[in-house]
Amino acid sequence: MERTHRWALRSLAAHRAKETGQALFAIVQGGAHADIRRWHARELGALDAPGYSIGGLSVGESKEAMLKMLETVNAELPPAKPRYLMGVGSPEDLVEGIARGVDMFDCVLPTRLGRNGSLFTDDGRANVRNVRYREDPGPIDPDCDCAFCSRYSMAYLHHLFRNEELLGYRLASIHNIRYLVRLTERARAAIGEGRFDAFAAGFRARYRPSDAGVRAEQKRKWLAQSGYEEPGEG
């Protein structure tokens, strides 16, 4: 947190001197320590940055800890400035983040899952490799307007994955990205109409998040495939 804060002071000073017109966000750190998070959010808030990033909340801690820290940080940040939650991109985390005041997200998850045959739906993730989709004539989501759902069937996507055709990975990735865009569009509309609480409750009641153990195993496989070792490992 101290290192990040020093970078914020230097970066904002240099950025303002150049007058580039770009929006340089300050990053709130502090792990799962509420006192450190609260202090850092207050200190950065006093710097009047164009916006604020929330870092270090997608690195292995529980979702409960992440949500608790979001509540702690967002209670201290300037209410009129945008908040960006770094490295978070699952549908349930977007809804919960928005409910706690987050405006922006980014993550490799939608394309990573897409390349591995997992598609986002309002009911949870669907594995295109499952035999149930071998002869399915419809899209994964009839309401989706992405390049996959508007043109192709699940049977075709299943065929592409079974034969390791690159088009399958691309279509699945496009669907997942479009799903998240549509989800945030629905959330925005619900906020504008004063019904976000009902929207979030309906989403939570229907969506089935993946098991924490399954997520951890998937992450282990992805790291092994990439050759990347997390800090403290090996």
Image: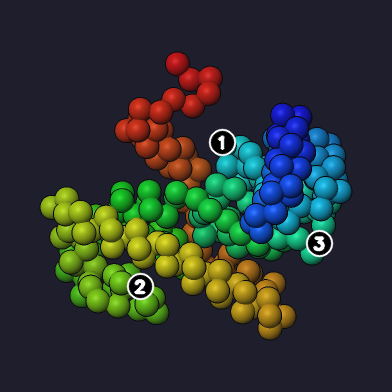
Check the image and report above or below for 28 versus 173: above
Q: What is the C-alpha distance between the residues marked 3 and 2?
A: 34 Å
**Marks 1 and 3: which is nearer the front?**
3
Check the image and report above or below for 203 versus 127: below
From the top left corner, tell me how far across and down residue 145 is, in percent.
37, 77
Label 2 secondary element: loop
Along the horizontal axis of the image, is 107 left or right of 103? left
Q: Amino acid at mark 1?
A: Gly
Label 3 secondary element: loop
- The dot on residue 12 is none
Dot 1 surroundings within 10 Å: few (below 14), some, or many (20 or more)?
few
Check the image and report above or below for 59 versus 168: above
Give me the residue at 71% from left, 42% from top: 14
Label 1 secondary element: loop
Give me the residue at 57% from left, 56% from top: 105
Q: Residue furthest bottom?
A: 193
Q: Residue furthest front?
A: 18
Q: Are marks 1 and 3 in contact (CB under 8 Å)?
A: no
In what quadrant of the picture does the C terminus appear?
top left
77 and 123: which is toward the camera: 77
The residue to which callout 3 is attached is 79
Q: Is residue 130 visible?
A: no
Q: Amino acid at mark 3?
A: Pro
Give me the residue at 53% from left, 23% from top: 231
- The dot on residue 60 is 1
Check the image and report above or below for 26 versus 190: above
Q: Residue 104: which quarter of the image?
A: bottom right
Q: What is the C-alpha distance between the residues marked 1 and 3?
A: 28 Å
